[in-house]
Structure formats: structure tokens, C-alpha cells
Image (spheres, grey):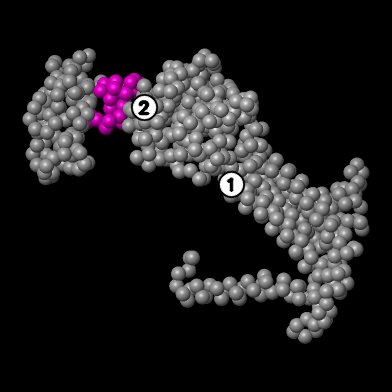
Amino acid sequence: MLVHSRTGRWTAWSLFAVLFVPLFALPLLVILAASFSTHWSGAFPSGPTTAHYTAAVRGESLQALTTSLVTAVTASVVALTVGTWAALAAAALGRKGKRVLDALFMLPVAVPSVVVGLAVLVAFSQPPVLLNGTRWIVIIAHTVLVTAFAHQSVSAALRRLDPMYEQAAASLGARPSYVLLRVKLPLLLPSLTAAAGLCFALSMGELSATVMLYPPDWTPLPVLVFTATDRGSLFTGSALAVVLMTATLLVLLAVSRIRTKASYR
Amino acid sequence: MTSGIRFDGVTVTYGGNTVLDSLDLTVEPGEVMALLGPSGSGKTTALRAVAGFVRPASGRVFIGDRDVTALPPYERGIGMVVQQYALFPHLRVEDNVAFGLKARKVPKGEIPGRVADALEMTGMAAYARRHPRELSGGQQQRVAIARALAIRPNVLLLDEPLSALDAQLRSGMLAELARLHRELPDVSILYVTHDQVEALTLADRIAVMDRARLQDCGTPQDLYRRPRTEFTASFVGNANLLPVTVGEKGAAFEGVTLDVPVSGAAPGSTATLCVRPHLVGLGPGPNALSGRIGEVQWRGSTHRLYVEVGGHRVKADVRELRETPALGTEVTVHFAPEDAVLLAQGVGDG
């Protein structure tokens, strides 16, 4: 521990409690409480019910959850593949080429996601590539948005990867493709799964670009949360939000289990 | 394919800096050649040029009769062991050793036998199922050697292989390496080190490097007894280097005429006289020099005396003295004429 004196430690903990609890934990607890209520007029919610959840796991809501999951998984897989590929390519390029490639991949992070959404909408609303009104436009937008993070975390991991492994493999007679498959990717696996988790979580919560793009038959869960609260159904929206949160957390937990296994080796 | 390595005028530059300057050196088949030098001397660069990780700006590198200068590392058929072991952390010991065999598409049936042989040879057979992180540094280095030997290379490159080990382990591994070389007499070994003990113990010949250049090359005995340059004399064995003026018979140092072999040196010229500290004795004798003790170091079985003669310090390693002499004591030291070597001035640049 960095803080040694007893008073110092006590102060640190209280500061943590004062800052963390109201800012991070409490709002989430409020949503959880609201999702089980029918009224909230006093200090505490009232009229406990599970009706919102019964509604949240069937019909339109269930459809939205599946939509979100499929979108997030597809976007993450594509982003991870493209991001890793680009990071590997950038590492092989010279310093200048690498900088250009890195900058290109960072663009979607620097540009507000609303702008990315609009750009995708305008770009794919006309032939030759007409995707407006299909699920693909949502998936493409999500992929564009999360690839930057995949690329960034993989290239950071690649920088930390000691070139001696690659050289040892080459001296043993391994061609570059063999080195990639048998040495580099296995050693990058912990970072790859971390990047996958990050991409998935970002995509699951994406709203601002999605609302500009989603077709009626491909409504991700955050859009449903937004529309529910927008029309005043706060408690329904809360239940949907809790479902969204739980689904994301469960997937992240599963991913982190793979990661612990990979890094333990 | 024959073994042996030949550097033919190999120059390597990094962004305008010459890190290896036209190296000409031949490692005979089955020979252990040590590349000895301080850090930045170009010795590792020379090894990496053989491995294929640096491309020479000019010159050619041959492995056996084959010009490998333009070949990628994976086509060179070399075994390499580096200081940090570079074992693949995600693979078990046996899979690390099998890696090169699988990469070279050795028939599947042969692999287990060759892995077992390599592990047997380095005494690591009992650890085949372990992961590298479960092994000590010395064990990891044995696995790295087994991995390099499994592909049966004609040329083995060892880059400071013992530098990460502690002193005791190092001398044990040194003996192991010598034994391995006896078991594999056809393999040429290029051994990069900054440690003269390793080079003297293991090498058939030593190439002394400094400032990107080859300074000297010869058998360990040759370099130790008859160094050709000041750099070799001081880097290998930390010799006394005394500036002398060559006379008709002998050479003058601080007004004392010393009886030393001067054949070939022109009378009246200045030169450097090289005398090993352990060949300098305390007390009167031939080639006696008088001075005051400037410093004393106790080294267990020996005392290292620094005797100030004129403006120079003469190092003498003498058997442990009963009583440590006090600083400033007047003493006489001497050395036998045949233990001195005259270096022509200006050959070395140290």
C-alpha cells in the first residue's frame, strides 16, 4: 500500500467512498431499484413489481437484446481482425508509414460518433453501395467505431512484445507466417481478448451513431432504452438498462476467463 | 553442406554509424571462435549478421560454401542461443525444443526422438512437460541450447549465453558447453562474450573486437602470452603496459634498462612493454623495479599490489602475504625477461 499512516489510509478510503459511491455506484443502484418499481414520488421507489422484467425478456425487447448481441459480436470480430491485421502491418512498415496508419485508425475516436453515424448514413444511402435500411449499416458503423480501440490495444501489445521471440523462431527455421500463427498471436492472445471485450462493451452501449442508422427490424437495446425513457416509461427503461448491463457484464466475464487462462500459461 | 563461417569484408551501419567495420574472419568447421570485446565493439552485430537479423552494407557472409548474405534468417540453418533465453513462454519445454523441427517440417515420427535426444544431451529430459516459467535461469538456458541443437545446425551462434547466470552456475555451464562441443565436433560455434574467462576457457581461437573493428585474432594462449596490440593485452588478462624506449639490448623504462626481447624493434623507438601482473614477483631479481606501494587489494589467495614506479603503476599479483604491506612502503618488484612482450607502438589504438 502506498499510504502508510493510519489516518492517511482512513482519509483515502473516505475520499474513495465520497467520490466513488455517489458518482459510480449510486446511479446504477437507482436504476436497479427503479426497474423493480411502479412509482417513485418520495425519497424511495414504491410498488415493487417484476412486471418490467417479464416484459423485458420477451417480444420486442428480447429481439433488441439479440440484435445488440449479434451486432456487438460481429463488429468486435471484424474490428479485432482488421485492427490486428493493421497493427501487424504497421509494425512491419517504416516509422512514417506506421504513423500514417495509426492516425487513420485513430480517426473514428477523434471524430464524434454522431459524425461517424452521419458519415456512414450519407455514404451508404446511395448506389453503388446502398445499405440504408438494412442491418449492415448498423454493423458497419459499430465496426468503424470500435476498430480504433482494437487497433490501439493490439499495437500497444505488439510494441511490448520482445522481438527476440520472433528472431528465435526465425533462427529455428520458421517462416514469417508460421511465426505469426505459432508465436506472435499466441503471445498476443491476452491482449486480443482484452481488446475483444472492450470492443464488445463499446458496441453494446453505442447509441449516438445507432439512432441515426437503425432500420425498424434491427433495433439494438440501447435504442429501446432511449425510446422508452424518451416517452416517459422510466421504469421500463430501467429494466431494459439492467438487462443490457447484465448481458454485457456476463460476456465480459466470460472473455476475461479466457484471458486469465491465456496469460497463465 | 559444410559448416564453418566466413566474414568477407562485412560492414554494418546503423543510420550513418559504422557498427562493424569491414570484418574479415573465418571460423573453421568444428571450431569454437569467441568474439571478445567490450559492449559496442561490434561483436554482437557480427553474430547477428550471420543469423540474418542485420543486413551488411557491404561484404559477404558465408556459412560453409554458401553465400547467405541475402538469405532470410529462416533459410540459414543456424542454431542460436541468446542471453535472455527467448524460450516461448506459451509452450512446454518439449514443444519449445520441437518448434524448429515442426517449422522445418521434419517428419512427425522423427520429432519425439530428436526432442528427447536434445533434452537428454542438455540434461533436461526430466523437465519436458514443464513450462519455461517453472524453470530456473540455468535450466531455461539449457532448454534454449537443446532447442537450438535439435535442428542439428552446422553452425551454432551463442550470444552472451551465460551472462544472465550467476557466477557459480556460469562455470558449470561453461564445462557443459565444452562437453557439448566435444560431443558435436563438426559444429562450428561463434561465441560472443565480453568475459575473457569464458573466451579463454572455451574457444579454440579468440577474435578480439573493439570499436567496430577486429583488433586481434589467435589461440587463447597466443593472445594471452603474445598479444599483438595494447587493447588485447589489457582486455585479455589486464596486463601491465609500460612505455619503454627500445635500446640495443633491452629497453629502458623510467631510467632502468630492462632485459627484455626486443627483436624486430628499431633501437631508439618507443614501444609498449606488456607484462602480466601474476608474472611480476615481489623482491629483488632480474628486471627489478623499485617504487612505493600505492594501493593494496586483498583477493583471497592473492594480493594485488599497485607499485608506483616513476609516474606509472605496476600491477603485481603475488601469493597472499602474511602481513598486508602498508601504503607507501618502498618495495622492489621484478619479472623474468621471457615473461615480457614488446608491443610495437601504434598497432593498437588503446
Magenta segment: does it hold B238?
Answer: yes
Q: Quadrant of the C terminus of chain B?
A: top left
Work out whether residue A35 or residue B101 is closer to the camera in this orientation and state it: B101
Q: Residues within 10 Å of mark 2 (few under 14, many from 20)?
A: many
**The N terminus of chain B appears in which quarter of the rendering?**
top right
* Mark toward the viewer: 2 or 1: 1
Residue B287, given in percent of the width and then of the height, sits at 11, 26
Q: Is residue A17 above or below residue A254?
A: below
Amino acid on which the number 1 mark rests in the picture: Arg
Percent of width and height locating residue A179: 62, 34
- Which residue was labeled with disc 2? B202
In the depicted view, which residue is nearer to us: A89 or B117? Answer: B117
Q: Are marks 2 and 1 on the same chain?
A: no
- Image location (x, y in percent) of residue B89: 56, 42
Counting other residues with Cα less than 10 Å from the Cα at mark 1, is it few (<14), some (14-19), or many (20 or more)?
few
Q: Residue at x 66, y 37 (%)?
A: A181
Residue B37: name its quadrant.
top left
Q: Which mark is residue B18?
A: none
Q: Secondary structure at mark 1?
A: loop
- Image disc number at residue A265: 1
Q: Position of residue B124 (x, y in %)?
A: 48, 36
Element marked by disc 2: helix
Stretch in magenta: B214-242
Is residue B205 rendered magenta in the image?
Answer: no
Residue at (72%, 73%) from the top-left corner? A29
Chain under callout 2: B
> What is the spatial separation of the Cα atoms under label 2 and label 1, in whole angstroms?
36 Å
Q: Could you tell whether A170 is left or right of A25 in the image?
A: left
* Left or right: where A83 falls relative to B243: right
Quarter of the figure with residue B22: top left
Amino acid on which disc 2 is placed? Leu
